[in-house]
Structures are given as structure tokens and as C-alpha cells.
Amino acid sequence: MAGKILIVTGEFDSTADLMVVCLRARNIPFERFHPQDIPRDATISLSYGPDRAPVATLRDLSGPVEWSQFSSVWYRRPEPFSLAKTLTPEEQEFAWHECTAVVQGLYRAFDAFWVNHPDKIRVAESKPLQLTLAHKLGFAIPRTLFTNDPEALGRFFEECKGRVVYKSMTQGVLGKSGQQSVYTSRLTAEHVQQADLLKNSPGLFQQEITKACDLRITVIGDRVFPVEIRSQSNPESIVDWRRGEVPRMEHKPHQLPAEIERRCLALNERLGLNYSAIDMILTPDGEYVFLEINPTGQFGWIQDVTGLPLIDTLADLLVGEGA
């Protein structure tokens, strides 16, 4: 019999809330754990001895639970640790590293089926790695440059005839609160003239591809759910669909060519992922162009606007693989 499902996320996660409703309706046992409550409102204990197996115990305000009860873990979007404000900056840095060490130690030392393991997530978030693997698998990809060299950017801008966009290489937010987003934006000649700013931070630049629509492809286990996002009818969302009122955009399920679907599954397998959200472009000529893969990408709104059974499919995966 399968054990409990552990949901590792933040306190305010509407997608995790949907999963909680689903699991309760199906009478599937689970626990929800917020690492942000560590170290003050939640504890982790890893106990070792010469004559017994290691034991891991999580305790929060709802009480203790042993890791051995879990067969599957859904690692969503945990928030930073809640360190005491009375600590000095140096003490906070030390405490943060100690918290990280014990939490990562727990994740690495104790077995479960993961969607997805945080170590796999960290590797998969590398944009250079994503494009390298996508190219090897046969995806069409945009001409791309990662650089902090102003001269290289100038040459790239000319090669692309001025059709270049800037993208962030990481999660695309500013500040510790993560409230300010960094969207994909068009590069202008004026921006290139200010390229000395690259000496402060490298950038990711891509040739802008003309779109018929955006595609959001949710991969859950061996199932693929492609959805068209009709972003091109709104000036705000032409370059980056996230800039528009996403729930109000037209969304509809899309039929991928079998080979593109196979490549999506192969990319997940190469990265060791059991879930991902892949962003692609469908051009007016019918070409599928890979942009990126998001190992913890959002999907709650996709289910809301299309009716696709994403939460139930993920629950099936967590239950089935944890059995």
C-alpha cells in the first residue's frame, strides 16, 4: 500500500491548495510542509545510530511525522527560511547555511518518489543546459547568446537584424520578496549602445521569433498536455505572454506532432524530471520552436481555463509511483 504524499511548498500556494482539495476528495493521505517555518515554527531531526536505520522527523504546528511514512514528495515552491530578525547579518548567513544543509541532507539521504527532486530542479533550471539538450534532441531553437561582452552583443544584434529579445537566466524576479518580475523584452539599438551595463551582469539574448501563438506544454509522467495561448492579439503579450491578462487570453488544447511530443518526454527523461512545463512557439509557418523548460512551472490556471485534468493526473502519478 502506498504511503502518504508530502507536499513541500509555501504557505500561499494556490496550486498546492488545488492538490489538497483533490487528495482530500479522493481520501489520499498527505502532509503539507512549509520549509519557511524552519527554524522557529518547524523542526527537522535526523537521527543516526550504529544499530538502527536512520530516522527523519518533521515537526510543525500540526505535530510530528516521520519521513518513513512518505512514499511520494511533490516539491512545489517553498519559501525562504524564517530566520530571527534579532540575528546579525553574519549570524543570519550562518543560520541560513545550517538550515540549508540539514534540509538538503534530508532530501538527499531519505528515499521517496519525487516530483521533482530539488537537485534535479537546480540542474534543469540551467538555460544553457536546456538549449544544449533541446538541440541534441532535434528541437528547433532560436539563435541565442549568453554574454557579458558588449562587443559580442553588438555583433549578435547586427546578425539578427535588430530582432533580439532579452530574457533573464534565472527565475525572473527582483529583490528578496520576488514581487517584481523581469519579463522578456525587445532590445533596441539604444540598449545596445548601453551594453557596458553587461559588465554588471551577463544577459541572455535571443533572436525574436514571429509567433502564430505560444504553446505551454505540461508534462506529467508520461502524459503530455499541450495548450495554445493566443497571445498575439494583445500588444502587451506579443513578446511575453505573461505581461497580459493571462486568464482572459484564449487558451485551447493543441495536438502536437508525435515527434515533438516524443522529444518533450525525452527532454524530461534526460533531465530526470517527472513534471515540467515547456514553453514553445508555433510560428505562422507551422514550425515548433523550443524556448525553455520549467521544472516547477505553474499550471493551475491552465486547468481552470481549459478543464484539462492536470491536478488529478499529477495525483495519479504521486499515488501510482509511490505504491
Image (cartoon, rainbow, N blue to C red):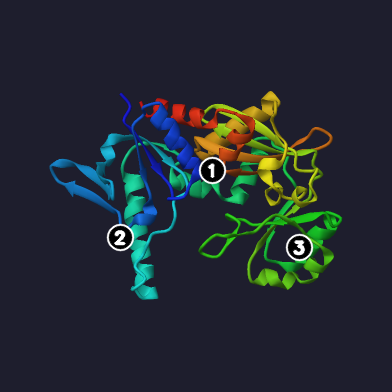
Image quarter hosting the C terminus: top left
User: Which is more foreground, mark 2 or mark 1?
Assistant: 2
Could you tell me the amino acid type at mark 2? Arg
Q: Nearer the viewer, residue 58 or 203?
A: 58
How packed mark 1 is, by other alpha carbons closer than 10 Å (few <14, some 14-19, many 20 or more), is many
Could you tell me the amino acid type at mark 3? Leu
- Residue lying furthest right: 161
3D distance between C-alphas at marks 1 and 3: 29 Å
Indicate the position of residue 139 as horizontal and vertical percent values: 69, 37
How packed mark 3 is, by other alpha carbons closer than 10 Å (few <14, some 14-19, many 20 or more), is many
Residue 266 appears in view: no
Q: Nearer the viewer, residue 301 or 274?
A: 301
* Badge 1 or badge 3: first in the primary sequence: 3
Q: Which mark is residue 295?
A: 1
Q: Residue at x 67, y 49 (%)?
A: 242
Image quarter hosting the N terminus: top left
3D distance between C-alphas at marks 2 and 3: 47 Å
Residue named by callout 2: 40
Locate residue 221 relative to residue 65 in the image: left or right.
right
Indicate the position of residue 72 as horizontal and vertical percent values: 38, 35
> On the image, which quarter does residue 151 sit in?
bottom right
Indicate the position of residue 32 as horizontal and vertical percent values: 37, 43
